[in-house]
Image (spheres, grey):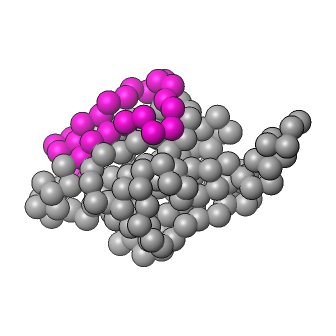
Amino acid sequence: MGLFGFMKGKKGSPLGAPIKGECIPICEVADPTFAEEILGKGIAIKPVDGKVFAPADGTISTLFPTGHAVGITTQEGAEVLIHVGLDTVELKGEHFQAFVEVGQKVKMGERLLEADLEAIRKAGYDTVTPVLICNSDEFPDIERKTEGIVDVGEEIMTYK
């Protein structure tokens, strides 16, 4: 194993921001399923635009028919869920467009979804976007960025 393999193992595998916005602690999300980390550990992003990108290389493992949420399994086996907005499943796909399908391999930074944040807010929904590792119990060391503005691809979590 070369130096980079050793360093990667020490630091943990990174997840990039799937959407541009402001990082907040997951406990501040106004939905107990996310705030209490019932679905897994993570963070949330208050998005400034609705373009959602792959946070890492992996395979699309879940795509809700409504387009409001997408799951990706990374090469390291982390099951990452990106959920655009709270209770947005109730919009039944309105204001969302998916660009991927289940089973598709994606590279970090590849476009996954697009959401019309303004229309979602006008419809009365919070657009905060939780980003979770659903199988976080398999990764005992998860570090999270919980404040500051992030651009797409900027590191928001590491896990090992």
36 above or below 42? below
One can see residue 160 in this view:
yes
Is 109 magenta? The answer is: yes
Q: Is residue 77 left or right of residue 70?
A: right
Magenta extent = 88-115
Q: Locate residue 26, reporting x and y percent.
A: 48, 69
Give the position of the N terminus as an image quadrant.
top right
Number of numbered tags placed on the structure image:
0
Q: Locate residue 90, reporting x and y percent.
A: 22, 51
Q: Residue furthest bottom?
A: 28
Q: Is residue 120 left or right of residue 52?
A: left
Q: Locate residue 107, reporting x and y percent.
A: 51, 32
Q: Residue furthest front?
A: 3
Q: Is 7 in front, or is 106?
A: 7
One can see residue 32 in this view:
no
Q: Is residue 99 left or right of residue 141?
A: left
Residue at left 67%, top 60%? 142
Residue at left 30%, top 34%? 98
The image quadrant of residue 148 is bottom left
Is 21 magenta? The answer is: no
Q: Locate residue 27, reporting x and y percent.
A: 48, 74
Residue at left 42%, top 34%? 110
The image quadrant of residue 20 is bottom left
Residue at left 68%, top 39%? 76
Q: Is 47 in front, or is 127?
A: 47
88 above or below 5? below
The image quadrant of residue 155 is bottom right
